[in-house]
Amino acid sequence: MRKDIQINTATNDMVLQSKGAAKKYSFKWLEEKDQYLTAQITIPSSFNTNLLYTVGVKVEIPYTPVYKPIRICIVKDFSGGNERVIVNPTNNSEWFEVHTKLFGFKDLNLCASQFIIISQDNYCIQLNEGIAYLWASGISDMANINANIQNRNLLLQCVPSNNYRYPTSGVGLIKYLHANLAHSGLAEKLQTEFKNDKVNVINAAFNSYSGDLELDLDFSEADADI
């Protein structure tokens, strides 16, 4: 069966699906000081510290309206109240300033209330040269589906001349609104356009109750080429 990127035929937008769900680790706000807010991320003792610099750590950060820069500390929990702080190698302190790189430009020192610009609540924090960079942790990709039904819908919607790659293709169903299926030339148009797409129209009829065009199609020739 043919496959293609899924399109929402009502809005003409590509359909995206979430991918790469990763484990989230504990985040909590600590204290509001005069110049900044502090927060803590807790990771288990088994967590490979090198991952903080390569893939980062996923956290859920609750929104706060406080307009102050953030400093975070990252703590390894060895259970029983035994904890070890990750040291910032640039200044030997326990604190990392939180920055981001919006739209690929220079570093921005984010304030807490601005986190919503990056994501609603799910984030990835990645360490680099003493800075904790904040990214959205959500990963989306285009959905790939069996395309026979989608191709049918798009071929029916497409008006000839509206597709720059195939300017003569398309049934242009909108042109046949309120037309008689038997006398409007629609039947011949359906046969021709679907045949060009290696699909045979076995039967076509309007459902007078729903207003839908019901098609009985044979995709065997199209699927045989895959």
Image (cartoon, grey):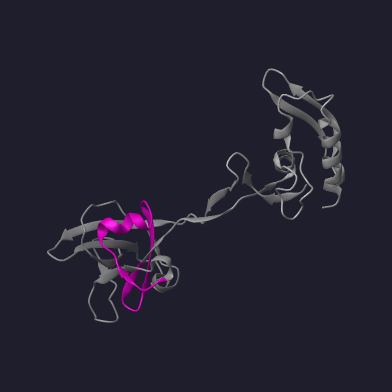
- Please report the bounds of the magenta region as a residue range: 105-133
* Residue drawn at 70 percent across, 39 percent down: 157
**Image vertical order of residue 204 relative to residue 89, above or below:** above
At which x and y percent is residue 35? 15, 66
Residue 2, visible in the rendered structure: yes
Left or right, 30 with respect to 164, comes to left
Q: Closest to the observer: 144 or 83?
A: 144
Query: Quarter of the image holding residue 147?
Result: top right
Q: Nearer the viewer, residue 17 or 150?
A: 150
Residue farthest along the left direction in this orientation: 34
Is residue 60 among what the camera can see? no
So how many labels did they put on this image?
0
106 vs 14: above or below: below
Residue 117 in the magenta stretch? The answer is yes
Give the image location of residue 166, x and y in percent.
77, 52
Quarter of image, res 84: bottom left
Task: Give me the residue at 33% from left, 70% from top.
Answer: 132
